[in-house]
Amino acid sequence: MAEVEDTLKRIQGINGVIGTIVVNAEGIPIKTTLDNSTTVQYAGLLHQLTMKARSTVRDIDPQNDLTFLRIRSKKHEIMVSTDKEYLLIVIQNPAE
Amino acid sequence: MADRSDLKAELERKKQRLAQIREEKKRREEERKKKEMLQRTENVSEDSDLDRKRRETEALLQSIGISPEPPLVQPLQLLTWDTCYFHYLVPTPMSPSSQSVSPPSETGSQESIDGGTVGRTLQWDTDPSALQLLADSVHGCRMQRLGASKIVQIDFMPKELVTYCKETQTPVASDQPEEEEDEELSVTKSEPVPQQLEEESSQEAEEVHPRELTNEEKEQIVHSEDFLFFFDRSIRVMERVLAEDTDIFFDYSGRDMQDKEGDMQAGSNLSFNRHFYDEHWSKHRVVTSLDWSPQYPELLVASYNTNEDAPHEPDGVVLVWNMKFKKMTPEYIFHCQSSVMSVGFAQFHPNLVIGGTYSGQIALWDNRSHRRTPVQRTPLSATAHTHPVYCVNVVGTQNANNLITVSTDGKMCSWSLDMLSQPQESMELIYNKSKPVAVTCMAFPASDVNNYVVGSEEGTVYTASRHGSKAGIGEMFDGHQGPVTGISCHNAVGPVDFSHLFTTSSFDWTVKLWSTKHNKPLYSFEDNADYVYDVMWSPVHPALFATVDGNGRLDLWNLNNYTEVPSASVTVEGGCALNRVRWASGGREVAVGDSEGRVWIYDVGEQLAVPHTDDWSKFARTLMEIRANRGDGEEEGVLELPA
């Protein structure tokens, strides 16, 4: 729906946001604002990391589940909001 | 016909032989059985030995006694000649000769027997040896009968890859997603629809790890209710996170910030691009001069002095390097019999390279000719130079240009490039009518063809002019305590004119900023810890200049930022003394020549190299500040000189 597009555009327009990717449960990007190679790279890597994080959380407490993952690096901040099937990945430059 | 009769005779012989062979075969089998029995009773060795010996002797006797021992040989030959016939007649006798059929495991050819029978049963041992003997005799008797042997073609079917077409809804493709999907399936309840879509898409592109969904599939997913639910929730959270921009890592002590700035600056402001070095021509030579081509911004000419390690090589070498291509060999190689101390592209003649040498000769090379030696040279006479020429410069316009050269005995000559046999005019640079000036460097201010500044070995700087009433040395600028190695006039063109400024570098570890209006330096930069070998203003930025020193340091000074320390600094790899620095005409690259024959090209970052529009006014203010500071410090000896 148009809402999804508009919302993604709005997110992209926030100052400091580098890119937004929506990934499905298999790691295949569904929607993205970055170029293809970067998208595929991010989607694959973050999907694996999210799965690992999720399994970690569940190992500690089976009733628990992963909801949000935030990776802060020197240059960027990668935020992954996750649920059962999809991942919403936003990469921003936190200095701005 | 003869063959036919032979064949018949042989047939008869064959029959006899076959009978014999059958008997032998039976015998062997019996013996084998006996041996097995004996093996069970553990009496193998003796009997087998006996048997073997017996058979060996028999074989020997047979071979020696009667020349053709057809029973064992003939089948072989007949096999080669007329296989089908032989097959029809005698299927079994192939076995003893080929020794293949009877033991169930063995098949095939003669060669296998010799090799493969050791250790099978002891009976076999005799036969290969017998056969060999017989074969030898065969070779001895019949050499001429060679026919085509039947090629036994054995084809192995290609290994069948068993693949299954998966049409069920179980997870497919690579292991990892399988595992993950299993996990998910086991852990969560999966919606059937998106799963199906995903599986279908994954079937479509199985092996490729970055799989792609078609647009329709993507649209379908996006429109699914499940996705919208997820998206709604996630976006809410994400926006909140994005809205909170607090830098949780902020360090109030400021150390972090400094590091960041430093890194960014060092990383982007002055970065190594490439270096030029030729094993043959630039090894062990000092780079004495550099120049960028005005016509082709990617061409750089470098001159080198003698290579002490190679006395038979020419003393002076000039190489033209190309920045555009990655190749590490020079575009052009020029030689000269004397070390080249200064070099430059002829401004208005794109094909000419001018070099001033140690002997005082000016050499002119042309890249249109295929010669490596100069196409024109000035004479070694008293009318021209007799001392090393450290400065060559082409000044003027397209139609009226001259080559100005100055040597260390204070002689300035002006040449026309068409005729280098004698100078158009020459002048002795004498200060106060007594002292000739030992000129080490020379610079013309931008767009001035008459007046120029020279630096001398004594550490004094002079202005000079070529024509006019005051031709010759003008004012003296005193300030340096050591020989002046480099001099550069401000040549960035902008709203404010700074062409009266020039900088000098010297052996006294300092770089000084002068104005032609004052005979004392405006400012002295004392950040170096070694001889400063060269200085050059940026051609585009009004407040930026580069210096190189003997420690291998390349410094970029931006006077609008700091006057105390360089704004960017880098030490060249290898730590060799750097002899020359030259800005590229765009002001974005700096070429540095060192004492080992290497030319280093550094990229200057945009922040530093590209001037802002207000940099000119800023620099004017900086100058005023400098003057004010200096005015406070020194008040004596400052003469306001007529411009």
Image: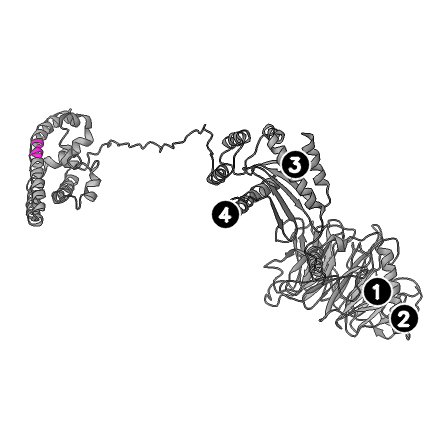
Residue under label 3: B232
Work out whether mark 3 precedes mark 2 in sequence or the reverse, and give the earlier one: 3
Circle 3/circle 4 CB separation < 8 Å: no
Residue under label 2: B631
Side of B36 relative to B426 (left or right): left
What segment is highlighted magenta in the picture? B17-23
Secondary structure, magenta segment, majority class: helix
Residue at the location (90% across, 74% down)? Answer: B637
Q: State the mark number for residue B492.
A: none
Side of B482 relative to A70 (left or right): right
Residue at mark 1 shares a chain with residue at mark 4: no
What percent of the width, then of the height, locates residue B325? 64, 48
Task: Return the chain for callout 2.
Answer: B
Residue at mark 3 shares a chain with residue at mark 4: no
Work out whether mark 3 precedes mark 1 in sequence or the reverse, and give the earlier one: 3
Mark 1 surroundings within 10 Å by alpha-carbon count, few (fewer than 14), some (14 through 19), many (20 or more): many
Residue at mark 3 shares a chain with residue at mark 2: yes
Q: Which amino acid type corresponds to the residue marked 1 in the rendered image? A: Val
Side of B68 relative to B555 (left or right): left
Rendered image coloring scheme = one colour
SS for callout 4: helix
Q: State the mark number for residue A59.
A: 4
Task: Return the chain for callout 3.
Answer: B
Circle 3/circle 2 CB separation < 8 Å: no
Q: Nearer the viewer, residue A84 or B596?
A: A84
Q: Which amino acid type corresponds to the residue marked 4 in the rendered image? A: Asp
3 vs 1, front mark: 3
Mark 3 surroundings within 10 Å by alpha-carbon count, few (fewer than 14), some (14 through 19), many (20 or more): few
4 vs 2, front mark: 4
Side of B48 relative to B642 (left or right): left
Q: Which amino acid type corresponds to the residue marked 2 in the rendered image? A: Gly
